[in-house]
Amino acid sequence: MADSGIGARALRKEDHRFLTGQGHYTDDINVHGQLYAYFLRSPHAHAAIRKVDTGAASKSTGVVAVFTGADVAADKIGGLICGWTVTDRHGKPHKAPPHPILAHEKVRYVGDHVAVVIADTLTNAKDAAEKIEVDYDVLPAVVDVAKAMDAKAPQLHADTPQNLCYDWLLGDPAQVDAALAKSHHVAKLDLVNNRLIPNAMEPRAAIGEYDGGTDSYTCHSTSQNPHVLRLILCAFILGIPEHRVRVIAPDVGGGFGSKIFCYAEEVVCLWAAKKVRRPVKWTAERSESFLSDAHGRDHVTHVELGMDKDGKFTAMKVETLAAMGAYLSTFATCVPTYLYATLLAGQYTTPIISANVKAVFTNTAPVDAYRGAGRPEATYVVERIVEVAAREMKMDPAEIRRRNFVKPDQFPYQTPVALQYDSGNYAKALDDAMKLADYAGFASRKAEAAKRGKHRGIGFSAYIEACGIAPSAVVGSLGAGVGLWESAQIRFNPTGTAQVLTGSHSHGQGHETTLAQVVGDMLGLPIENITVVHGDTSQVPFGMGTYGSRSLAVGGSAAAKAADKIIAKGKKIAAHLLEASVDDITYAKGTFRVAGTDKTKSIGEIAFAAYVPHNYPKDLEPGLDETAFYDPANFTYPAGVHICEVEIDPDTGVTKIVNWAAVDDFGKVVNPMVVEGQVHGGIAQGIGQGLLEGCVYDKETGQLLTGSFMDYCMPRADDLPSFKVGMIETPCPHNPLGVKGCGEAGAIAAPPALVNAVTDALGIRHMEMPLTSERVWRTIHKMAAE
Amino acid sequence: MPTASMTVNGKAVSGEVESRTLLVQFIRDKLGLTGTHVGCDTSQCGACVVHVNGKSVKSCTLLAVQAEGAKVTTIEGLANGGDLHPMQAAFRENHGLQCGFCTPGMVMSALDLVQQIPDPNEQQVREWLEGNICRCTGYQNIVKAIQAGAKAMRS
Ligand code: FES
Ligand code: FES
């Protein structure tokens, strides 16, 4: 058992199929009789549609149908929804302008869906799309979040003056101002959190099918949460009953948040499948992904942090403008509010904090959760201003952090921004990270680099994360349209193997292995005897899917609860077979025993008896199949410290990351190999944001200038170092496994560590991400000129 | 319509294609070998890497008709029955994959590297992978896997 139970570096069960080309991603699936959809997208950032002429396209070779926004409106198909209602500072709900699945009357960003061609082949569909004539009346566009509220800015939607979606407040700014006024020193900073394009390597795809015989639908989709997608498709958009829709999210090639949302294309495929009575398949080309996947971040922030003469934080004030894009994506509204402002305490005991967030519409792709979702933005604000404060106070960056940490004996710790941290040991993570990074040796490394004409710098990031957002009653009171529990079912088979059905979804995280480890550990089964089933609404009872690093903390806890039920029932069966009282039966690692005797039954024997109940308790149902729903008592709070060391070549402006040390606290770790992999990937994405990636729209025309892998710089292998990863473990006190969640940590921690290191190396106060070689080179040369 | 004929994973295949059909479309759509993936439309990502006449090639940059008469190997052609190729095994043992989407291209690319440099150091592996994007792993375990795979192949 040791090799595959909780804590083991078990090799992944899913790998064999991926390594041999036998995965089943959505585009690998072909349905008999399928047609292909191709979307005609708006070439303009903002325009009125005067007329769409589909005549020639409809007659084009192989075309079965062409649909436009007018057809959608005629069929009374609902728009895409935003599932989280944010109440603004005046007590009013946010503005929720219509978001049609095909644009009607107006387009609002480059890539907005104007029409769909459905044809026998993809090439025929594409050829026909070129024959659609759209008469646009081009309007001025605003793409810059900082300009969206300007008096001169064009208004995207009726009833949204100044393009304002909401003006939201947490805390009392007047009180914070008063505290800042009394502070010994106030550090101030303006910063931009650059817009990112998620770019999971598998482009989004969907297949819609309609069965006239049963009046039912099947939708294959690259979704992170098939049940949520089904709920939205049925209850909100298409108005079809949930029991006649099956959503399957098969193997999914990465998501990072971008595949949480319900998108126009999958709705169109399902709707059109019924209209043309044939399956309809769509797969995004990468350029379409760039244009139409929900983007991430895009904040402009002003922050002020007060402190006393010892560098103890006294108050913090944050003002943020957050882009929503042209329309509200599924969870857009909660990202810069409940997933952002509530994290602004960081790891520190800052006594009062206020945050004002104005969310605005711009003529750009919708913005929504992307790996970290709000928490990277918060951490960037906190860890940048803390760094600035340290430098202005002439304090060591480690020392100022340590001095302000929430201490281990202060948990549970109530922050001034709503959250109650459950556990942690921040100073220990800092100590370990400093050792791992050899902080003590930094000064001599810097001096040595200087001799070679290079600038060395070091940067800290002490981040806090909130994972497994819950409990449902709390998120409901904050405006969520859903509950945030998870379900699991364990089907024990008569021959002693088991299936674990989970409502979470794996798109790289390795749940088929780690959930099997959890259940196998509890039920005494090797992971080879367990299959984890996910991603099919017709198999799994229900689920809320995977995002916010929730799958193990919430989904794993549900599986543990289901295993508890299996054991409890098993005890009754064992008591009967062993002729003992239930209270005398003990259970450990797959064996039921009459306490203090050698009378035992293995769980396999119990399962067999449950399905072949010839000798069986009279009042007990046969079968060994248990379902559990788990609604957590609180978020979990992973935290850690990352230290980045860089060396900059002033001649080229190239920043080389020479050392990266990460010490994270994820609570109990089920599979260290998988967790390290998650940390590596997260750091890489965070470094991507800090160093390389930045979504750019042309300020005049609203064209996406970074619309391909040639223009948008994804981190490559030779941009990154090997990371040193360490862990500490303070178990989560409120879930049965003691786990916290690790999926987003790296992406949250990395950007400020990197920017702190580069600004340290250059001896400057601030520089906006991404810190491309060009920006760094220009900064160095500007400094030299001054 | 033109025909494309080639040997794929040791089997002679041929099929009608449009002149604009890409090799990757031929492999996926005509032959049903869906282990070769498409991750971009600008030949940057490397999800589509296969071997053509023994060399790694992005199958999205080649027309099917250009591979006329060629010997093509895809990810499906590597494992010997149930046994993983040493490079595939090294990816599994070193957790060199997460979502698995980039993986076939990574493995095919890595095999060509090992043909050229049997014992690549970390920097050589990182530079070689310039044409293969992975969004999940941060590359660290891919690099480790490739070095381990190379070692296994040497012995
Ligand atoms: S699909 Fe060939 S390089 Fe991206
Ligand atoms: S494993 Fe997901 S892209 Fe590489």
Image (cartoon, rainbow, N blue to C red):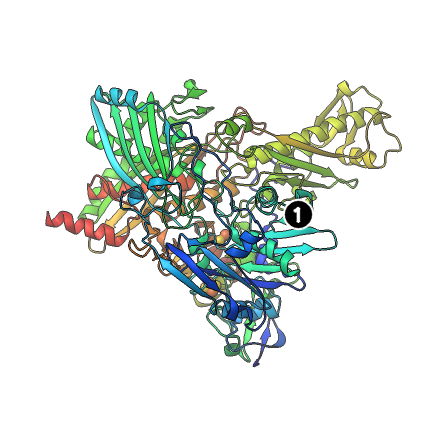
In depth, the one of B21 and A686 nearer the eye is: B21
In depth, the one of A469 and A444 nearer the eye is: A469
Q: In the rendered image, which quarter is residue A531 located in? A: top right
Q: In the rendered image, which quarter is residue A369 located in? A: top left
In depth, the one of A150 and A407 nearer the eye is: A150
Estimate the x, y position of residue A137 in percent, counting from the top left.
37, 59
> Mark 1 packing: few (<14 Cα in 10 Å), some, or many (20+)?
many
- A289 lies above or below A585: below
Can you tell me whether the CB of the residue at mark 1 lies under 8 Å from the nearest atom of ligand 2? no
Number of numbered discs visible in the structure rendering: 1
Q: Residue under mark 1: which chain is it in?
A: A
Amino acid of disc 1 = Val
Residue B89 horizontal side relative to residue A243, left or right: left
Residue drawn at point x = 39 percent, y = 54 percent? A714
Estimate the x, y position of residue A433 in percent, counting from the top left.
37, 34
Farthest residue, direction right: A614
Q: Is residue A704 visible?
A: yes
- A730 lies above or below A58: above
Estimate the x, y position of residue A457 in percent, counting from the top left.
25, 42
Residue drawn at point x = 61 percent, y = 53 percent? A220
Q: Quadrant of the N terminus of chain A?
A: top right
Residue A742 horizontal side relative to residue A440, left or right: right
- A309 lies above or below B98: above
SS of the residue under disc 1: strand
Q: Is residue B114 visible?
A: no
Residue A471 horizontal side relative to residue A178, left or right: right
Residue drawn at point x = 29 percent, y = 53 percent? A699
Q: Which residue is mark 1?
A: A245
Estimate the x, y position of residue B56 in percent, counting from the top left.
48, 68
